[in-house]
Each structure stands twice: as C-alpha cells, then as structure tokens.
Image (tube, helix red, strand yellow):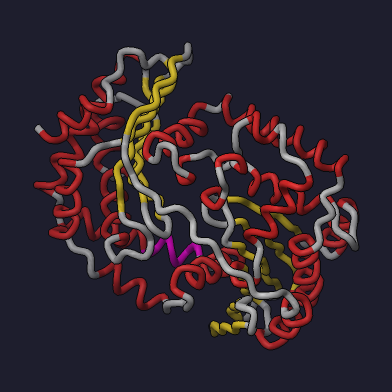
Amino acid sequence: MSVEITRLSNGFRIVTEHMPGLQSASVGIWVGAGGRHETADQNGIAHFLEHMAFKGTARRNALQIAEEIEDVGGYINAYTSREVTAYYARVLKDDVPLAVDLISDIVLNPVFDAREIEVERGVILQEIGQALDTPDDIIFDWLQEAAYPEQPMGRTILGPTERVSAFDRADLTRFVSQNYGPGQMILSAAGAVDHDAIVRLAEDLFAHLPTQPQALPEISRFQGGEARHIKALEQAHVAIGFAQPGYRDDDIYTAQIYASVMGGGMSSRLFQEAREKRGLCYTIFSSVGAYSDTGMLTVYAGTAEEDVTALSNLTMDELKRSADDMTEAEVARARAQMKSGMLMGLESPSSRAERLARVVAIWDRVPPLSEVVARIDAVDAAAVRAHAGQLLSAAPALALYGPVDGAPDAQTLRSRLAA
C-alpha cells in the first residue's frame, strides 16, 4: 500500500492510499472546524452547517445530491466533532471523480436556502430532544461541560435549543468564511484510487481558493467539577472524567493502554470487579478521548439507585489499586487489543481515509503503521503504573443522571482516591 501527500500552493492538502485488490474507494473532505471553533453565540452552528450541506448547492438541489450518489450505488454522509467536520462518500473506483466533484460542491457551494434552513432546524431540534431523552448519551455532554466549564471544549456539539432556533443564513455564511479556508481542508481518499488523478481533480476544484489566516481555537483547560441531574429513571448513570494528554503527546499511548486495562473489555478490571464479581451494573467501561491540546479518561457505568455509592467507591478503589499492582500480563493484553483493534479497523477504505485525514491534520505526515505499533509496544507496566499514580492527586469531573440525589459528589470521590 502506498501513501502520497500533495499540498497545493494555497495550503489545501490531498492525501491518498492505494489499496490493491479493491474495487471501491472512500473519499472525503475533512475540515478543521468543529465545535471548539465556535464562539458562544455560534454554539451548534458547525453541526447545523453539516446538515445544510446536503440541502442544495448552486448546481444541485437536495434530491439531485441524493440521486447522483445513489444512481451509482454509492453513499454519502457527514459528521461533526469538536475539532473536525467531515464530508465523505463510498463509491466504486470508476465513480471516484463523481464523488470528489459532489463533495467539493456541497462544501464550497451551499446555497443555504431559507426554507431548507427552517426544515433542517426542525430536524436538529428533534435530534437535540432525542439526545436529552437518552441518558447514556447526554451524560457525556454534561461530563464534558463539567470538565471544561465556560470553554468551547465543554460545549455540546449539537448546541442549545435557543441558539439553534435563532441561526440564519448570515450566521452560516459567516462561519464558513471564518473556518473553511483551503489550509483548513484535507481531501483524503483510500482504496481503488490514483493519487495523480485525484490531485488533478483537486487542482481544478480548490486551487482557486485564496489563502486565509487560520484562527487558533482557545486553549482547553481541564478543571473538573460536577453536573448532577436528578430524574426518576430506572437506572443511575455515572460518568467520571480525569485529565489526560492530547493526541500529540507521546503519553497518549500509555493513557489508552491504561484505559483498556481498567475498562476496555470483558477481562478488564472494572468489568470483572463491578459486574462479574459483585453484580453492581450491566454496563461499565473506560476510554480515553484525545484532542490537539487535551484529553480525558472517561469511566461510565449505569447502575441501580441503591448501588450507585458502592459502584462509585469501587471505581475509585480500582483506580487507586492500579497504581500499585498493574501487571505485565494485563498491559500485554491491552497492547494486543489496541494493536488488533487498530489494524482490523484499517482493513476498510473508509477507515483508511479517516486515519489519513486525522494524522495529516495532527502531524502533516502519515506515520507508518510500524511506527505506531512500536510506540504501543514500548509501553510497559511500569509506565502504566506511573500513569495511574498521577490520578491519585487529580481533580475529577463528575456527571450524574437519574436517581442520584444520594450519590457521592466529586470532592468525595477525589478524597477517596487520594486517601
């Protein structure tokens, strides 16, 4: 497999990976403009813009966008995260030029028709309502807010209802002009693709865009805190967060392996202790989310009201114990899980294109998989124990939802961890 990168004179980047033997390709544009690039008044507009991209351009209406991609058996989609908005398609190899043209059209030429704005506003408000009705979804937004209070990183991607209800065409156009410059875009493609052919397409479609300065987002500072929402639900939902390194930090590999040992699978410590041995919950897991300048270890569990204190205390005890008795066998298992998950995930062109865009945005290059595997293999039990030890004096973020009026608060959990 071969990876190639080209940068146009205006800063627009093209990265491709040819995967021999495939008859299909995944192609997309990743824009470095997500939730954290919004002002408080713009909160939710990056996601609103993603929705509007499929509602018509200067050349195609919404139905034509859908028909053109489905006429060739392909599909098109998009997502918004805190740091990126992505527009991507999967097609057969002969239809790659169509996919590039279609995606570039929805990114560069949206019309933001007033009627379509109102239609999509209703859709997004329904999406917000659905999230609020899903406890094991909304609790992570509340945890993020508790961890990064009064910061762009702490705001929900969907935005508050009052802001989404007020956005108009001028707001959408302004956000695009501020954040959709060529230096903020990466065209990524993987599968049955030819790099030179895609570069020629990109030159025709993007080379004319003027270079523009790229505003840096506000630096994120994990502060910790608590969000407690009491409601008569069947389960108490608990999410605990701790500050972790960002994805440019070499310690991110240690952090991810630690999260895997603690709650990454059925053999993990928290799953075995909380569910298998004590029956305190049905679901419990831990994971690390990483951004350019920060990250967070999240531990989530859903449990009965009468068990929330026991489960919270057990979680703190397991985190504390891990600083002393983390074994090489546990770390070796987590390394194997991390490597296999990464390598298995990259067997599809969609996953490859996603990785290419992500790592080019981070490092402006594509590290070979052998380099990443070597970094994972370099993490040993001593490093993971040391990482765990740093949590003992850390201030956690805590989000609680459901019958949680009697649950321990963030300070109580911190004290138990430090005792």
Residue at 78% of width from left, 60% of height from top? 106
Query: Left or right of 367: which side holds 278?
Result: left
Residue at 37% of width from left, 47% of height from top? 287
Residue 405 drawn above or below residue 150: above
Query: Left or right of 138: which side holds 95?
Result: right
Query: Left or right of 278: which side holds 227?
Result: right
Q: Is residue 19 visible?
A: no
Residue 322 is inside the magenta segment: no
Q: Nearer the viewer, residue 22 or 122?
A: 122
Q: Position of residue 36 (x, y in %)?
A: 51, 50
Q: Nearer the viewer, residue 142 or 276?
A: 142
Q: Position of residue 54 (x, y in %)?
A: 79, 52
* Residue positioned most to the bottom: 196
Residue at 57% of width from left, 48% of height from top? 38
The mark total stands at 0
Residue 343 is inside the magenta segment: yes
From which residue to which does the magenta span run?
339-345
Q: Position of residue 186 (x, y in %)?
A: 61, 70
Dominant SS of magenta comes to helix
Residue 304 drawn above or below residue 374: above
Residue at 32% of width from left, 64% of height from top? 249
Quadrant in the picture for the C terminus: top left
The answer to which quarter of the image holds residue 167 is top right
Residue 16 drawn above or below residue 133: below
Q: Is residue 329 visible?
A: yes
Residue 19 drawn above or below residue 357: below
Quadrant in the picture for the N terminus: bottom right
Q: Nearer the viewer, residue 369 or 57?
A: 57
Q: Position of residue 256 (x, y in %)?
A: 32, 55
